[in-house]
Amino acid sequence: MAAGAMTIAPIIPWPLLVMAVVAALGFTAWTLMRGGRSQPLPNRRPTALRCAAVVLLLLAALRPGWPGGQAQTATADLDVFFVVDTSTSMAAEDYNGAGTRLSGVKQDVIAIAKELAGAKFSLITFDNKATVRMPLTQDATALRTAMTTVQPQISRYAKGSSVTGAAQLLKERLEAAKQQHPGRPALVFYAGDGENTSAEVPVPMDAGNVAGGAVLGYGTGQGGRMKESTDDDAGYVRDRTSDAPQDAISRIDDGQLRAIADQLHIPYAHRTGTEPTSDMLGQARPGAMNAVTPDGPGRVELYWLLAVAAFLLAIHEPLRHVAALQRLRPAAGKVPTA
């Protein structure tokens, strides 16, 4: 046990504890005084024992303890922001064979949420505009439901999207989270293919308030075709920039994704569907992740000693009543006389 001063961690607010202790002591004093000094000591003892048991329980509620031991810090102390590209190019069929890039994102987001069970999650998507699909919540089921409803933007509505189209919205959400829970680490997982179709130069991503995370890249250098919508009978997006229109091909832009990773000061990981999620999480700023997951300084709890003492005092009461009942029973075999 490490040396140090005793600490307390009350399980109920201080005012309530003080009021309860004062009430217990006051009631006991009033009960004893009402009986007067003429009351035999054995008759006053049960009242004193009951009061002592109550006071011990209230002291146990203070949760006294000594510094020492080890305590597992929960991942519930994390805010996790998923920033997902939903532009038309995320429908490209070059993820782990012929799967769409967005299908890979969905698998990874759900897997990350499972690994970080207990954390708070938020989902931001972007194409022509950025949207908060889900504010911070510990409801992992809500995140799973939100991800299943996310679809790539229909091609006829596409007007060009920036790879950092969610930069401002993410910055605002991070600042709001910091104000609400100061000191709580925030992880950002950006998922996209890096394809920038906006005429404007992408604005830099702000690394402020970002404690860790990763930029996740989807797609291949060979590229893949994209369906115009999620309808089963939908055709593929056509490239009409030449005299001979053909199916448009979208390719991953690793350079853009690595630039975003550098701006956010988090690692870049190319996701192909064959790597375990744990490998990617291991690269997600290990220093930031380790700050919330390993064993850390704990405390040796002493409240249970007070609770045991209270139990030993309180058990006297039922034993006293049992003894009284036994005295009231007629002796076995004795026939009462008229």
Image (cartoon, rainbow, N blue to C red):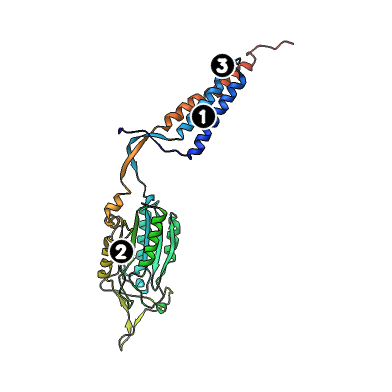
Is 28 or 108 nearer to us in this picture? 28
For mark 3, does the 10 Å Cα neighbourhood hold few (<14), some (14 to 19), or many (20 or more) residues?
few
Residue 317 has which mark? none
Frontmost of labels 3 and 2 is 3
Residue 47 appears anywhere in the view: yes
**Amino acid of disc 1:** Val
- Judging depth in this view, the residue of 306 and 90 nearest the camera is 306
Q: Tell me whether circle 1 and circle 3 mark residues in contact (CB < 8 Å).
A: no
Image point 30% across, 60% down: which residue? 214
Rendered residue at 50%/26% (across/down): 52
Picture quarter containing residue 129?
Answer: bottom left
Neighbour tally class for label 1: few under 14, some 14-19, many 20 plus, Cα within 10 Å: many
Q: Is residue 287 above or below residue 106?
A: above
Which residue, as the protein is rendered here, is positioned at the far right? 338
124 lies above or below 333: below
Which amino acid type is shown beneath numbered disc 2? Leu
Whichever of callouts 3 and 2 sits on the residue coming sooner in the sequence is 3
Quadrant in the picture for residue 261: bottom left
Q: Looking at the image, is mark 1 or mark 2 nearer the viewer?
A: 1
Residue furthest bottom in the image: 243
Earlier-in-chain disc, 1 versus 2:
1
Q: Secondary structure at mark 1?
A: helix
**Rendered-image quadrant of the C terminus:** top right
The residue identified by callout 3 is 42
Identify the residue position indicated by label 2 in the image: 216
User: Where does residue 274 sit, x and y in percent of width and height?
Assistant: 29, 61
Estimate the spatial distance between the alpha carbons at disc 3 and disc 2, rounded to whole Å.
Answer: 76 Å
Q: Is residue 188 above or below residue 243?
A: above
Question: For mark 1, what is the residue?
Answer: 54
- Give the x, y percent position of residue 9: 42, 38
Give me the residue at 37% from left, 57% from top: 80
